Amino acid sequence: GAVVSQHPSWVICKSGTSVKIECRSLDFQATTMFWYRQFPKQSLMLMATSNEGSKATYEQGVEKDKFLINHASLTLSTLTVTSAHPEDSSFYICSASRTSGAGDTQYFGPGTRLTVL
Amino acid sequence: AQTVTQSQPEMSVQEAETVTLSCTYDTSESNYYLFWYKQPPSRQMILVIRQEAYKQQNATENRFSVNFQKAAKSFSLKISDSQLGDTAMYFCAFIEGWGKLQFGAGTQVVVTP
């Protein structure tokens, strides 16, 4: 149990276009979902936390107008990178937890590699 | 300030041998949770083991075990009988109560035949 999927697994887009990444919890309901960014050979950097039906909470330095997050249901969260630029190229990973309780385990998706030309 | 510290950037181990990865953390809270995640070349983050701070017993999961030293704020991971499939980046992670999950810089483990 606790499987999280992401789609697409990789995407290439032109500068100035928008890209949507989906994150789904396949066999459990995810009260809370998280979006991370990972640069090569570095650790994960939390971008935002979202609870179903609520606005996402963004980490300091993350532009909420550029990285739109929608947690529409207990199994789906989306990250839209608006007006993407080459510096947005990165590996984006989502995770999901069953509850918003203290220390609840996060289960991670396989990640999405975004390349902006 | 770095909350989770992994001081070993890379470690190499032969098949069937044992390797121990170190992790230290900093907190003044009593309610917290510790995790080890592995990230193989596929980049899928996989939960290896979880430890609740209030539990004195060290968590184990098959060939993976931890040595949780609460007073020293240390949480090391031991991989026994290493297998080629254990080759991955290993991240120590820490969460205080309802706070956010914080990762260390990672330790690359390479298992050689």
Image: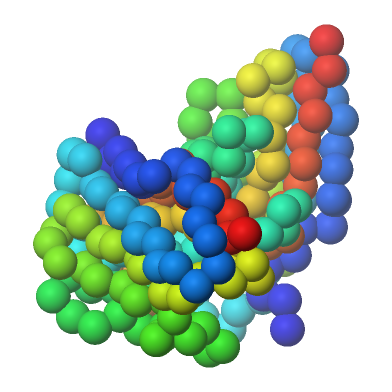
Give left or right: position of B2 versus A62: right
Above/below status of A104 relative to B8? below
- The answer to which image quadrant residue A20 occupies is bottom left
Q: Is residue B51 visible?
A: no
- The answer to which image quadrant residue B105 occupies is bottom right
Q: Which quarter of the rendered picture does the N terminus of chain A lie within? A: top left
Q: Give the percent coordinates (x, y) of residue B69.
A: 66, 57
Q: Is residue A1 visible?
A: yes
Task: In this rendered view, identify the residue nearer to me: B86 or B18.
Answer: B86
Task: In this rendered view, identify the residue nearer to me: A74 or B79.
Answer: A74
Colour scheme of the rendered structure: rainbow
- The answer to which image quadrant residue A73 occupies is bottom left
Q: Give the percent coordinates (x, y) of residue A11.
A: 48, 48
Q: Which quarter of the rendered picture does the C terminus of chain A lie within? A: bottom right
Tell me the residue at 50%/56% (across/down).
Answer: A13
Tell me the residue at 84%/50% (across/down).
Answer: B9
Give left or right: position of B71 versus A101: right
Give left or right: position of A22 versus B19: left
Please count the marks in the image: 0
Tell me the residue at 71%/17% (across/down).
Answer: B84
Tell me the residue at 69%/16% (across/down).
Answer: B83
Q: Give the percent coordinates (x, y) of residue A111.
A: 48, 47
Q: Give the percent coordinates (x, y) of residue B94.
A: 55, 64
Above/below status of B64 relative to A102? above
